[in-house]
Amino acid sequence: MNNSELKKLFNSMTLSEKVGQMGQVTPDFFSNEGEITGPVAEMKLNSGELYSIGSILGTHKPEQVIDIQKKYLENNRLGIPLMFMADVIHGYETIFPIPLALASTFDTNLVKKVAQLSSKEAVGNGIHVTFSPMADLVRDPRWGRVLESNGEDPHLSSKLTQAYVEGYQGKSLLHKNTLASCVKHFLGYGSSEAGRDYNTVSVSDLELYQNHLPAFKAAIEAQVKLVMTSFNTVKGIPSSANKWLLGNVLRKELGFDGIIISDWGAIQELINHRIAEDSKEATRLAVEAGVDIDMMTSSYIKHLGDFIEDGEINIETINQAVWRILTLKNELGLFEDPYRGLMKLENLDQNLDNIRKELEPITRSVASDSLVLLKNEGILPIKTKSTKVGLIGPKAQTKDLLGAWSWIGDKSEVISIYEGLQEQFERLTLSTIDDTDSISKQDLVIVALGENSDESGEAASRSSIQLQQEQVELLKKVYEINQNVVVLLINGRPIDLTNIVNYCKAILECWFPGTSGGAAIADVLCGRVNPSAKLPMSFPASVGQIPIYYNYLSTGRPKNESNKDEKYISKYLDIANDPLYPFGFGLSFSNFECGKVEFSSGSLSKDAPIKITVTIKNLSNISGKTVVQLYIEDKIAEVARPVRELKGFTKVSVEPLGCEEVVFEITDKDLMYIHSNLKESADKGSFNVYIGFDSLAPKVGEFVLV
Ligand code: GLC
């Protein structure tokens, strides 16, 4: 539809039809509509209201979408089609590794590909919009939703967020297999106090602008179509009612002109936050703050019309919201084809089977690229198929490898660790702890430990980040019998591994690896794939260190090698300050080394960036990939700055005994930071440069910004 036709349609809408577009409900509202029971009754939506609703979230099958759209269009006066939205977080039905695992690849091309493939399957199921990527900055593994994030670094998260948005949306939403992307949760949700989900957030403006905003800025620069408000307060006001956050920051400063959608029930929750007396007041606060779509409450549908008729809210506020909603429906081509190609498919199931067949092998290679080798005392890879391999532990045979946000995923399709290992090893023995004799006779024993899917994700915070005690006891018993132990971890958050690290010779962090998880794990264990992933979040040595992250500020009394025994410095009495495994860390079967480093110049200016070239050597006879990381330290600044910040990362493959050159370009934009006036700029001065394979990379030089 062209703009004038869309304008004509818009101008023909009644007030209640406009208000309806700003509502969003789940599909069951349309399944039991006949007898008006269930949520329809609770939300008391009458038929007129129901058939003016603008969008649906959470359908599972294309047939369901077709049925609801058909019934809706038969009852909607102007024939304005519904938009269908869903949480396509790491795949739709064919499940990829969790986002935190995808972040471990440090590979923007891989993430973009996963988003493209996930879109293909979701579109084949009738979905138009995904509530992804989650761009929350996270530093607290007690918070279960770190699983959905890109980790603790603003630069890495910004690059990956951009890749997700570009992967979902492609060049145009009129192209098939594209989804409109909704970046979330705006803003600061990852700093929920004590890691307890939905808890209070109190971070400084400086922290918000410096660390929480960059990934959202990257999404907006990538033309993201929707932003979802977070449950939490920002400066004391819940995001969904926060005029400063949505009006000043998101609309004016970041220039976002797409749809703002609340999180599930967040408008009604303004009552629980005790800033709204009732649903009517909650409605006024949210619409005046700038929320365009009310997810899963009847606040807007029930009260917006009255506010307009009473003159309390300007119709222009509604008009702008509805125009954004109609514009997105038009960009998706829904006016021309409300089924977005579904009705043209000869066989919906065959189409989905074909997509599944295309995606499954890719989930395997993506998963093996996301596994982080944390420890290896020469025991991996397991070189021969005839090696006697024992397998034990609660994760050995489980199909629960998909992780949170995969409820449409088919667990029966999951390749378990046992099934994956069977493919690679001829003398595999599944053991229990009573099989002491068998365990003692194995060349090595794989102990598969970790969390269940419901122990991380939304509403799954934990006060302890250690493994369950019975798992630790199991490992110790196995180690007593046979010390050639390899630990596999299935988990959605960094785990405190201090109580297991001395009872094994290798640890492979597998996260929730998705549909082909067991096969991918076996590919790494047998050396078919050389691990190359790196930690996107620090692994604490204790829950007592949290929040812990690599880009910390120096403080007035920093601890260092020379003063570490002094009393009056920033330290703990009982443990070190350092994490067990730092951000950016991950081992390989190869042995990489940074060779020569060359700076194109010792000084950088606005118009003259510098290039830093580093030679990466592979000293082993095993080809492999690694992530070369470049960190910058701003020596003196107007506000306290991190001891180092990631400013460049590149995944590079190096042949045995070979070497490859990696070139980083640093511009003045890379040196910009948020000043105390909340404005971003770069100051002249000197900077240290660190390059290596994790956040402890050594200093390789310095330069000045002139
Ligand atoms: C949930 C989550 C949000 C998700 C939404 C729709 O509560 O906070 O991330 O997209 O509801 O399922």
Image (cartoon, rainbow, N blue to C red):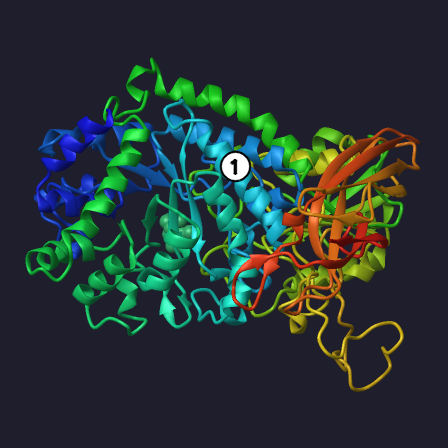
Crowd tier of the residue under label 1, counting other residues whose Cα lies within 10 Å: few below 14, some 14–19, many 20 or above: many
Ligand 1: does it lie within 8 Å of the C-beta at label 1? no
Towards the viewer: 239 or 252: 252
Q: Position of residue 243 (x, y in %)?
A: 32, 62
Q: Is residue 163 above or below residue 499?
A: above
> Taking 113 as reference, is 318 above or below it?
below
**Quarter the N terminus occupies:** top left
**Residue 565, image x, y percentages:** 87, 81
Q: Is residue 48 above or below residue 545?
A: above
Image side of residue 376 versus residue 288, left or right: right
* Residue 110 in the figure: left or right of residue 615: left
Q: Residue furthest top?
A: 346
Judge whether residue 8 can be spotted in this image. Answer: yes
Horizontal side of residue 377 vs 130, given as left or right? right
Residue 398 in view, yes or no: no
The residue type indicated by label 1 comes to Ile
Q: Quadrant of residue 616?
A: top right
Q: Please name the residue shown 55% across and 51% down the image.
A: 149
Which residue occupies the foreground of this view, 502 or 606?
Answer: 606
Helix, strand or loop for disc 1:
loop
Q: Residue at x 33, y 49 (%)?
A: 260
Judging by the rendered image, the residue that carries numbered circle 1 is 95
